[in-house]
Image (cartoon, rainbow, N blue to C red):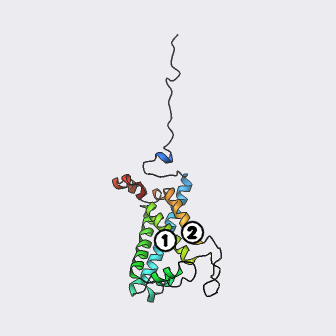
Amino acid sequence: MTMTSSHSNQTTTQPAATAAELSDGSTAQPTAPAQRWLAVVRIGLGLVFGWAFLDKLLGLGYATPAARAWVSGGSPTAGFLGNVEVGPLAPAFRGLAGSAAMDWLFMVGLAGIGLALLAGMGVRVAAGAGALMMVLMWMAEWPLASTTAAGEPSGSSNPLIDSHLIYAAVLIVCALANAGRVWGLGRRWQQLTVVRRHPWLV
């Protein structure tokens, strides 16, 4: 009688790489339908930021009339920051309104975030920058205040959550879920040597 080891002829099936083991630094493995919907959300957010950039740049007649377009000498930040009337940082925000440095920072941010989200490249950087922008805009609107300094209604409908914080949360979800790999150039982007060496660029 031939004795065989109980460990022979056994095939060990290795599970797929876990989130912690992924070389590209991703931390989530959503299902295929979820990945596609996250791609839709990412592209939608890219269009939101991209449209805001184009409207403020060219004055397309929606939020920004042609006379106030950046190319016509208007300021992309003067309208929003110049009308901040609530919150502890209101004077600081009004002081930044219309400055050339703030205009350039805001417009470069809108364009960069929009392009990165649409392309699916550098989604983590874009999501971080976009979330920071949204939080700053939330602080400028300061929904906690029910009235302005003049005693007028502030227009706040919720003292804590508004669309800016929802946008920020969704951007973070897209980054954590590696949303740029579906319907985007994220897979190719993540093969670049510099991105492999610095996963935060994913």
Q: Is residue 37 above or below residue 14?
A: below
Report x, y in % for residue 114: 45, 69
Q: Is residue 62 visible?
A: no
Residue 124: quadrant of the picture = bottom left
Report x, y in % for residue 93: 49, 80
- State the SS at label 2: helix
> Can you name the residue that lies furthest to the top here?
1
Q: Is residue 105 left or right of residue 10?
A: left
- State the SS at label 1: helix
Which residue position holds label 2? 165
> Can you name the residue that lies furthest to the left here?
193
Q: Residue at x 49, y 71 (%)?
A: 133
Quadrant of the drawing holding the C terminus:
bottom left
Mark seen at residue 133: 1
Please name whichever residue, 148 or 76, is drawn nearer the observer in this view of the structure. Answer: 148
Q: Residue at x 47, y 64 (%)?
A: 128
Q: Amino acid at mark 1?
A: Met
Label whose residue precedes the other's in the sequence (1 or 2): 1
Report x, y in % for residue 126: 45, 65
Q: Residues within 10 Å of mark 1 (few under 14, many from 20)?
A: some
> Can you name the residue that lies furthest to the bottom here?
67
Report x, y in % for residue 148: 61, 84
Please name whichever residue, 146 or 131, is drawn nearer the observer in this view of the structure. Answer: 146
Q: Residues within 10 Å of mark 2 (few under 14, many from 20)?
A: some
Q: Is residue 36 visible?
A: yes
Residue 102: quadrant of the picture = bottom left
Q: Is residue 154 above or below residue 26?
A: below
Mark seen at residue 124: none
* Residues under numbered marks 1 and 2 in contact, where contact means CB atoms less than 8 Å apart: no
Q: Measure how far apart labels 1 and 2 are at the Cα level.
A: 10 Å
Q: Amino acid at mark 2?
A: Leu
Q: Residue at x 58, y 76 (%)?
A: 142
